[in-house]
Image (cartoon, rainbow, N blue to C red):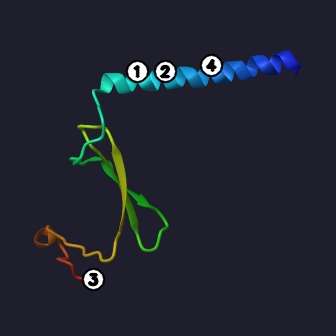
């Protein structure tokens, strides 16, 4: 690759970065978000994501403030797990071990 082509490629990459920044600025302007809140009203975004293979089990939860747009990520470690069968009365074996 010639020196001129390298310079041209660098400039193209810089232009792409600037274009992405402009698009992000426009998205922020149209979002209506202003300065960060003094007190956020966090709302869960999506579903908790389990980190597979972690011992103990860890869930990642993502939250967003609908007023200012800030986000937060929390990790929850499962210390205890209890299973309940709300439909036990309708099951054939009613929880008996299979023979």
Residue marked by disc 2? 22
Kindly report the distance in space between the C-alpha atoms of the residues bearing marks 2 and 1.
Answer: 6 Å
Q: Are marks 1 and 3 in contact (CB under 8 Å)?
A: no
First along the sequence among labels 4 and 3: 4
Residue marked by disc 3? 97
Determine whether the residue tagged by mark 1 lies in a helix, strand or loop. Answer: helix
Residue 80 position by quadrant: bottom left
Q: Position of residue 34 (x, y in %)?
A: 29, 32
Q: Nearer the viewer, mark 2 or mark 3?
A: 2
Determine whether the residue tagged by mark 4 lies in a helix, strand or loop. Answer: helix
Q: How would you rate the neighbour count of disc 4 (Cα within 10 Å): few for under 14, some for 14-19, many for 20 or more? A: few
First along the sequence among labels 2 and 3: 2
Kindly report the distance in space between the C-alpha atoms of the residues bearing marks 4 and 2.
Answer: 10 Å
Kindly report the distance in space between the C-alpha atoms of the residues bearing marks 4 and 1.
Answer: 16 Å
Q: How would you rate the neighbour count of disc 3 (Cα within 10 Å): few for under 14, some for 14-19, many for 20 or more? A: few
Residue 71 position by quadrant: top left
Pick the residue in front: 52 or 22: 22
Q: Which mark is residue 26?
A: 1
Q: Which mark is residue 15?
A: 4
Q: Are marks 4 and 1 in contact (CB under 8 Å)?
A: no
Q: Position of residue 45 (x, y in %)?
A: 30, 45
Residue 13 in the image: above or below residue 65: above
Give the residue displayed 87% in from the left and 20% down from the top. Answer: 3
Q: Are marks 4 and 2 in contact (CB under 8 Å)?
A: no
Q: Nearer the viewer, mark 4 or mark 3?
A: 4
Residue 30 in the image: above or below residue 76: above
How many numbered marks, from 0 up? Answer: 4
């Amino acid at each position: 690759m010639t020196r001129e082509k390298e310079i041209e490629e660098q400039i193209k990459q810089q232009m792409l970065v600037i274009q992405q920044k402009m698009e992000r600025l426009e998205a922020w302007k149209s979002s209506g978000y202003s300065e960060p809140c003094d007190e956020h009203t966090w709302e869960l975004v999506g579903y908790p994501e389990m980190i597979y293979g972690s011992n103990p089990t860890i869930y990642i939860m993502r939250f967003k403030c609908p007023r200012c747009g800030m986000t937060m990520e929390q990790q929850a470690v499962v210390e205890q797990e209890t299973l309940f069968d709300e439909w036990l009365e309708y099951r054939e074996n009613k929880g008996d071990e299979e023979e």
